[in-house]
Amino acid sequence: MANRNHFTRSVSRHLPFGEKRDTRFYGMHIVSVEQFDRQDLDTIFEVAREMRSMVERVGSFDLLKGKVLANLFYEPSTRTSSSFAAAVQRLGGSVLQIDNVTFSSVSKGEVLQDTIRTMESYTDAIVLRHPEEGSAAIAASVATKPIINAGDGPGEHPTQALLDMFTIREELGRIDGLTVTMLGDLKYGRTVHSLARLLALYDIRLHFVAPDILHMPAALVEKLKEQGMAPCEHVDLADVLPETDVLYVTRVQRERFDDPSMYEGVKGSYVVAPETMAAAKERMIIIHPLPRVDEISMEMDDDPRAAYFRQMENGMYVRMALLALVLGKA
Ligand code: ASP
Ligand code: CP
């Protein structure tokens, strides 16, 4: 793809586990899913499976011994932050956690670029979550060490989309040929912005179900069409649920609304509950990047189709794979 190598510094080398693999990940910034093609996803999935099996067998191993990861979070996080921390520690490395930026020099007015220059002088890679769309690209433009975008405002959340794709593949055994329905806040939800772009690499039928004011951004819909997709937009989940193989539920992103009354007007627009799921296939999955607020009833949690906690666990294996590939030692 056009920008396949845009964020890559090419260093040819052998990757772990004694097997020669695609070496293009070494030193790469991970800013947008648009950097990846299907072959890259196959590589990431294969390494993630090896990571899962290693964690099950031995818990941790010293692949990244001596490496230090910076976790730089300007917005709240539970899963992304802790799964990256667990990932690097299970690989024998360590983590420098900065998640309360009010106690850092950010509160003195330091610009992102200077904070990045500082953190990269102490560490080997930086995981960055920031409220501004485009912040990860700005960070990557000054950084000499890899920047991993952990969410740039309403922009993208590429590592989430990779773990979403891995979950779909592991749960349903394939990606091509599936019908995927994205539900909820498609305007501000960065996870669906990344996931829709990755799904465009596959033969997928895509439905968007959202309240009127939370549609998928028009520019992204246009782009998906140019890539040969024909996403259908709906307001009513019942229109598409019976044919859905993957129901991707999202939280209405309260923190992105300027006007709280607009949030109040749309929160709770959709609630997936056992009654809703009566119309769904028996073999399908419900996934959600989490945290959920009220868009999936807790009564759904024991339904075998509810894959969101398995998805969350997959996050650590996929992030171990990404760190191994980006920082990998021969
Ligand atoms: N945790 C995801 C994100 O940071 C989804 C969400 O917060 O609703 O984008
Ligand atoms: N899915 C996700 O990004 O979760 P956190 O916001 O808890 O990191």
Image: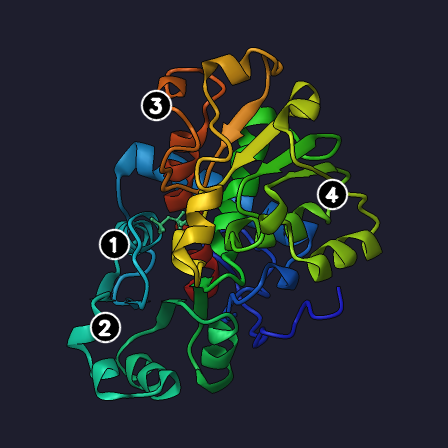
Q: Position of residue 215 (x, y in %)?
A: 63, 49
Circle 3 crowding by C-alpha within 10 Å: few under 14, some 14–19, many from 20: few
- The residue nearer to you, when weighing 74 against 93, is 74
Query: Is the CB of the residue bearing disc 4 within 8 angstroms of ligand 2?
Result: no
> Quick check: can you spot residue 17?
no
Which quadrant holds the C terminus? bottom left
Q: Amino acid at mark 3?
A: Met
- Disc 1 to disc 4, how far (Cα)? 33 Å
- Disc 2 to disc 1, how far (Cα)? 23 Å
Left/right of residue 147 with respect to residue 195 in the rendered view: left
Query: Pointer 4: what residue?
Result: 202
- The residue nearer to you, when weighing 248 against 234, is 234
- The residue nearer to you, when weighing 78 against 165, is 78
Q: Position of residue 54 (x, y in %)?
A: 36, 39
Left/right of residue 180 with respect to residue 315 in the rendered view: right
Query: Pointer 2: what residue?
Result: 101
